[in-house]
Amino acid sequence: QEQRNAGRRRKTLEWHETALGFLHQYLVKERHLTFLSQLTESEIRGWLTFLHTTSSVTGTPRRASTIATYGRSARAFCHWGVRNGYLDRLPITRGILPRAGKKRIQVIEPDVFERLLLACRPERAIGVVGDRTAARNRAILWIFRDTGMRASELCGLRLSDINREQRTLRVEGTGRERWLPLSSNGWYQVLSYLERHRPAKVFVEGEDVEEGFLFLSETYEPLSINALTLLFDRLRKRAGMSEQPINPSQLRDTFAICYLRAGGEQDTLRELLGLRGKTALARYEQLST
């Protein structure tokens, strides 16, 4: 449990580093500011506008929800600055952060999913490296498609979270753990990656081998959310869908819609997705009919 908590803290830190990195880059390169005391409400507003009018690292416009999340990270940092005397007052006031609009639910159709699977092998990748990367990418796509888990939950999967007898994966979300079943295709891809392509001797010093992360990057580091975002960007480009947004959230929505269309119960779906409220379920139900 301590290792899992450490993993969650590491992912939270990665997100704050990303958000504050964007703020630092804007202040230095666009505004030529070097001192924290120069951070004002006007500068924060300019940064938020800059995020809205420029593209992300994947070349796509940033969503209002993403910008709002960056802003909350910056606000937490500014609170720290005020408490420690680096700022005279908080430069992020109420109403300055953008409101996240209602997310549009988009279902990934079977033919699109097949195109993504065919794009799992990197261009010009041959031999063992190409086989390993393709197997990992296919397993990731099938897990998202079969379980509807969140990107952070997939990145947090460990070898000990696999139940071979039940063909399920354990996710420790808020509240309690969930065991999510895989389809026959999904289980085959996960097992193929695990037994034939995942490096068997990659581990962190002092860590139990069974507690190693399931998915690794090309440099054998635990797969991060940022790396996952870039992976999906590469997949959609190789699949010839550069203008079409493809991300884990859409596969989560696709799982939910297909589950309800197949006759699944809302309460069971809420447990599988780890949801607390019923707002998302109502939207899924409306679309499924």
Image (cartoon, rainbow, N blue to C red):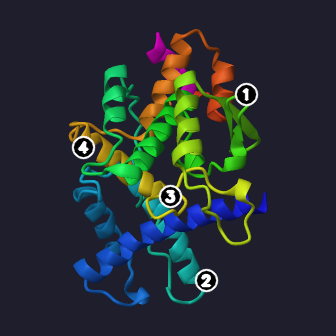
Mark closer to the observer (2, 4): 4
Is 98 drawn above or below residue 164 in the view shown? Answer: below
The residue labelled by disc 3 is 224
* Relative horizontal placement of residue 113, taking residue 17 as reference (left or right): left
Dot 4 falls on a residue whose secondary structure is helix
Amino acid type assigned to the residue bearing label 2 in the image: Arg
Q: Which residue is mark 2?
A: 83
Residue occupying the point 52% across, 74% down: 77
Front position in the image: 188 or 160: 188
Q: Residues within 10 Å of mark 4 (few under 14, many from 20)?
A: some
Please, what is the dominant secondary structure of the magenta stretch? helix
Residue 124: image location, x then y, percent: 24, 51
Picture quadrant of residue 84: bottom right
Where does label 1 land, which residue? 166
Q: Looking at the image, is mark 1 or mark 3 earlier in the sequence? A: 1
Amino acid identity at mark 4: Lys
Marks 4 and 1 in Cβ contact (< 8 Å):
no
Residue lying at 58% horizontally and 30% vertically, measured from the top left: 187
Question: On screen, 271 above or below 15?
Answer: above
**Residue type (three-letter) at the residue carrying disc 3:** Ser
| Residues marked 2 and 3 touching at CB (< 8 Å) | no
Q: Nearer the viewer, mark 2 or mark 3?
A: 3
**Mark 2 falls on what kind of element?**
helix
In the image, residue 15 lies in the stretch drawn in magenta: no
51 or 57: nearer the viewer: 57
- Residue 16: x and y, percent? 50, 67
Residue 288 counted in the magenta span: yes
The disc at residue 237 is: 4
**Amino acid at dot 1:** Gln
Mark 4 or mark 1, which has the lower sequence index? 1
Q: Which residues are magenta?
A: 280-289
